[in-house]
Image: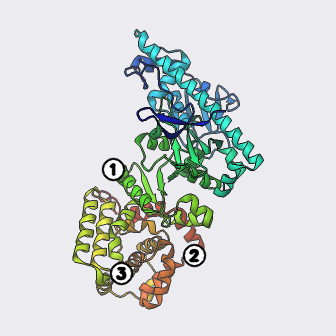
Amino acid sequence: MPMLSNTIDSASGKAAHHRVVAGAVRRAPSGHPTVRPSGLLTPAVLESVRERAQITDLFGPTELKRSGREFLARCPWHDDRRPSLLVSPTRNRVHCFVCGKGTDAIGWLQDRQGLSFQEAVLELARRTGVSVAEGDPEAQERFEQEWRERRQLMAQRTEQRQQFHQALLHQLEQGSEGADYLRARGISHETARKWQLGIAGGRLTIPLNDASGQTVGFCGRATGNQEPKYRNSTGDLLFQRNGVVFGLDQAAEAICKQGTALLVEGPLDVIQLHQAGFTQAVACLGTSVSELQLQLLRRQGMKHLLIGLDGDSAGQAATERLVEQLQTQLTSGGLSASVVQLPEGEDADGLIRSQGATALEGLIASARHWLEWRLDRILAPLAADSASRSLETLQAVEQAGQALIEQLADGVLRRSAEQRLTVALQGVNSHQESIAAAIPPSTLAEQALPTARQRLERRVVQLAIHAPQCLFMLTSLPVRDGACRAAFDWVQNTAMTVPPEQLPEALLRLVPQISGATGALLAQAIAPGADIIRLLHSQPEAEFEALANALDPDPRLPE
């Protein structure tokens, strides 16, 4: 069977002990490029492909059910319990009657196999016999040679995956090294089979698959004290590290249904999370996300990214770099993201093994909006006792906060960040006192008979308490009622001192100290009823959007 072999440093003559999967380093023959020749995707090629490629040929015979001249299939873009995807040979397109999505043969191949537009066109050209370099035999030959090499590499990786997997199954039966390692990591035999895990040369082999489930490379994880702990296949014609989202083939259905992907650091984190039921988990074989990887996630329906990198200092620094990297898309509305704050020194895998799935569920439920998370990092020095805060600390926090704000376009995010920075620099106590002095008293009668707007403003307070990830966005909404405004400020100030999951309990302890309508309103907002709490937990973004539309409508429209 193929083994993990040592490479030799020819310059020094010493064993470098770089362990790679045999066959993973496959270079194109001399004189042949390792990327597709430019200029192959011409308008003539595109037109020919669209004429010849039939959408029905991209489905298996058991996937299609005839309906008159058309066919029906299950839609991959939503939870389709009965076939609602119309596959039309006459129009050569697919269209879903439920979710409204549709595409042609090129788009379908892109979506289902995670290909770029050019890759999908060239693949269909090969299947349908369209020459991609008319009048340039040399370019056509290079393209066909590359395609043959890719097929050979794919077959080789598939064979390796099967052999590595069979070796692990044998060890599981015998109860030897591989079985001991999986047991120590809490990975079941069923999970090992589902993910086609293998063993070779003292390393657990984890197949790295593309979006369609084809193995393009391997990750080797040391089962003992070997270094490095992880070793990926070397990049080649088939495998490029920044073009693979680990676990996407397994997570695609959950991401499509939920609209959310959970990004963690390593392949074993992903495997452990899927085993625990978090089937939207993926990893990017590193702590950065390339534009191609982002495209692959979006093609599966991702609208929101949960960032759950490790809780150590390196993981937090990586989270900050990733948020900065994605900030343009996050502020333009092309993507939304939240940060799952893992305990210090923990990763997702270890958290589940030590505390169970419910611990991670709680952290996901209290995930911080990316901007609020960045503000938390900036304002962290102010968490110290006020007496020990130096002017230098205040100045550094102000400068860092202003630098972040200047990167934001005018709108709700910028206003929210400005307000939170101002409140934090003023100090919790002085801010509470100024708010209390400025608010006119409200009567209990008014509390009992709220107007329509007051009911909406009280919903703002409820959402702030039970979905604190929305808190900083809620600060931008115009809350006019004095009691609501005072209650909201109690929530905002208390949220700066306790973890999000402890906010309702902390506020409940404060209620006896808050007199009049404000205290009564706050008590009602803390316990509005189980049904309302479930709604606020499950649909916080929809609740915020509805409140924003009602309380702060487009100024161009009559209120």
The 10 Å Cα crowd at callout 2, few under 14, some 14 to 19, many 20 or more, is few
Left or right of 365: which side holds 470?
left
The residue that label 2 is drawn on is 529
Q: Is mark 1 on a helix, strand or loop?
A: helix
Q: Can residue 91 be seen in this view?
A: no
**Residue type at mark 2?**
Gly
Indicate which disc, 3 or 2, sits on the residue closer to the N terminus: 3
Is residue 329 or residue 379 the one in the foreground?
A: 379
Query: As rendered, which of 459 and 135 lies closer to the eye?
Result: 135
**Going from the N terminus, do you reach mark 3 or mark 1 first?**
1
Report the disc number at residue 363. none
Mark number displayed over residue 328: 1
Residue located at (69% from left, 43% from top): 168
Whichever of labels 1 and 2 marks the residue nearer the N terminus, that label is 1
Q: Do the residues labelled 1 and 2 touch (CB within 8 Å)?
A: no
Pinpoint residue 507: horizontal percent, then vertical percent.
47, 81
**Residue 247 relative to residue 435: left or right:** right
Q: How far apart are marks 3 and 1 (CA)?
A: 37 Å
Q: Quick one: SS at disc 2?
A: loop
Residue at 53% across, 25% down: 150
Residue bearing the label numbered 3: 482
Question: In this picture, is 376 found above or below 67?
Answer: below
Camera-side mark, 3 or 1: 1
Callout 1 environment at 10 Å: few (<14), some (14 to 19), or many (20+)?
A: some
